[in-house]
Amino acid sequence: MRQRSSSLGQAYDVSEMFSKEQSLEMFEKLCRIRYFELNVKEAYDQKKIKAPIYLSIGQEAVPAALSTVYKPDSKFTQHRGHGYYIAYGGDLEALADELLHKPTGCAKGMAGSASIHSPKIGMIGHDGHMGSEVPIGVGYLFGRNFKTGLNEKGLIVVGDAAAEEDYVLATYGYASKKNIQCLFVCEDNNLSILTKVEARRNWKTSNVARSFGLESIDITDDPWTIMYYAKEFDKKLPAFMNIHVARAVWHAGTGNDGPPEWDRFSLIREELERLELKKESDEIEAREKNEISELWKRL
Amino acid sequence: MGEKVSDTIKRISREHLTKHNGLILGQCLTAVGWVGGTVPEMKEEEGIVELSMSDVLNGYFVTGIARAGRRPIYVVRYQGFQWFNSIGLINYAAKSKDLWEAPCPTFIRSIAMDGGIGPVASGTHHGIYARMPGIPIAAPMTPKEYESVWDYFMSHDDVVLCSEHRRSFGIDYEFEDTIKNDADITLLPISSTRLNAIEAVKNLEKEGITCNINNVLWLKPFNPSDKMIYSVNNSKYGGLFLDGEHENGLAKCLAFDLMHKIEKKIHVLGLEERTAGFSPHLDNLPPSAGKIEKKVKEIMSKG
């Protein structure tokens, strides 16, 4: 069995399959997520945010890469959803207001960090039951498309813990049977709070999804590898991607237990330099860092 | 002869598919009998969708369909199956309007039956839904009552729990409330207990005990009518809720609410506080006429 690592399933030259514009678009989104989340962390540490927060620091590459090549009509995430909201064009100020408990938040303060929602970008909120977004999302897509003449696509994201819920697994089977046009993504940070996957199961989500009839892959969070498979799977929906990520902070809040298993942000910078995109990417990073910082100063 | 409840349900369901772009979903809908003759004999391409046998998935799946605006009718063939099916409907569909101003209107046909079906599947289970906000609950037993519950659903954006009973399917008449000024007690029957209540009242009258009957249709929100309050207040020994669920399910909540509006005591009689077995002598059925009569006499003897 292939083991979790920073290079699992990654081809050396995959980044060269994408245009300069696509690589920079992906990096711009990645920086926007990262610096937004770092500002959230600061606000939380300053006790401006009083409700639980679920940061995606260290996991930014997945939404940044997916949103660059996969354009679903609806998106379903669970508690760690800031990155998807940002990557798919959600209003940053409305998200910040939501986290700061303001009535101008994207859910008027009802949703907080865990249940963000934005009809404008087709992001449907989560209720807090781990993995419920999987059957709800599949039902939503069935309802949108059945006898309506529409052919809408969806993106449904779970974590590696929610991926074990019985109703999540059963949904893969029903989505396969009903040919639901959906890309399922498991963000696998190997942790349920602090309990590792190996303590909880001896099976792989990608194998189970395949057994239900879904196209399936098990890869690391290299963004070009993600983009490659997302483009391929877009033609073969429903499909499933288990993507290994290295969470940089705790499940909830801002603490950490030392450095993450790998630093994807640095690895991406190195690859952009190898692609001779250092100058442009440095400019993008500086601009995003500044703009996000200015946004939070205004709040 | 009027339209039976089963025909009313079937007619409403067919119209929902053909005129409102609705969907009917459930397990084994097309099996022999088409759920007691209540599901129109139509095909999946016409909107009758067979679900998987994963109950928890199905409740969430239907919630997603509701979120997409299709106003699904969700058929749960035994109310005991709600222990699995209700999770998504209670925690997502019913909360979505408050959380995100995104209603998920769903009509849940939760079907009860009694006798010989063991510890889980039998009886009514509306209490599972009643404890959480956002879900109106009704227990119609007649064609007109059923239609009124459906009309409520179609004119609102709520998740509605329709607590059905198979004993209602053949009913083609309406129940009348009876109010006498010199009554000893007012019976407040829910769902199928209405049928046993009528029999009990006849038997009690032979012994000189006078009972009013005030049938209960809407269980939540529970807004007792002036007529119900008058009836109970003018009954010497107050009122008695009758339910086919365990007494801690919903009946005690209704009794609590009503008691705060009147000057008399309200009692409850539901299933016995024990697990049902399959054998007839171990079954746990809604209060029979005999049990109702016994309970009324007990209340009267205690004053």
Image (tube, rainbow, N blue to C red):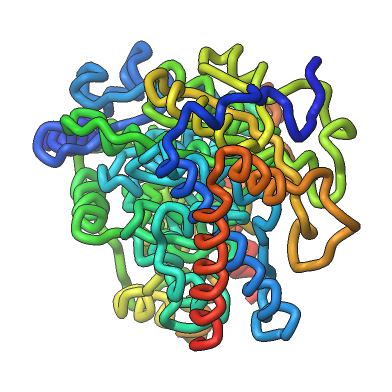
A116 lies above or below A200: below
Whether residue B81 can be seen here = yes
User: A230 or B209: which is nearer to us?
Assistant: A230
For the point 59% across and 33% down, the residue is A168
Res. A90 image quadrant: bottom left
Give whichever of A139, A104 is nearer the camera. Answer: A104
Describe residue B173's horizontal placement relative to residue A218 as left or right: left
Residue drawn at point x = 72 percent, y = 85 percent = A47
Measured along the vertical axis of the image, is residue B54 above or below residue B126? above
Residue pictured at 55% horizontal, 31% vertical: A15
Q: Quadrant of residue A50?
A: bottom right
Count of marks overlaid on the render: 0
Can you give x and y, in whole percent of width and height, for residue B37 in the image?
27, 23
Q: Position of residue A39 (x, y in %)?
A: 63, 74
Estimate the x, y position of residue A114 in percent, counting from the top left: 59, 61
Q: Residue at x 44, y 41 (%)?
A: A20
Q: Is residue A280 left or right of residue B175?
A: right
> With respect to residue B18, does B257 lie above or below?
below
Relative image position of residue B178 (x, y in whole percent): 30, 64
> Is B26 left or right of B17, judged from the image as shown?
right
Pick the residue in front: A255 or B118: A255
* The quadrant where residue A34 appears: bottom right
The quadrant of the picture occupied by the N terminus of chain A is: top right
Q: Is residue B123 visible?
A: no
Is B242 located above or below residue B21 in the figure?
below
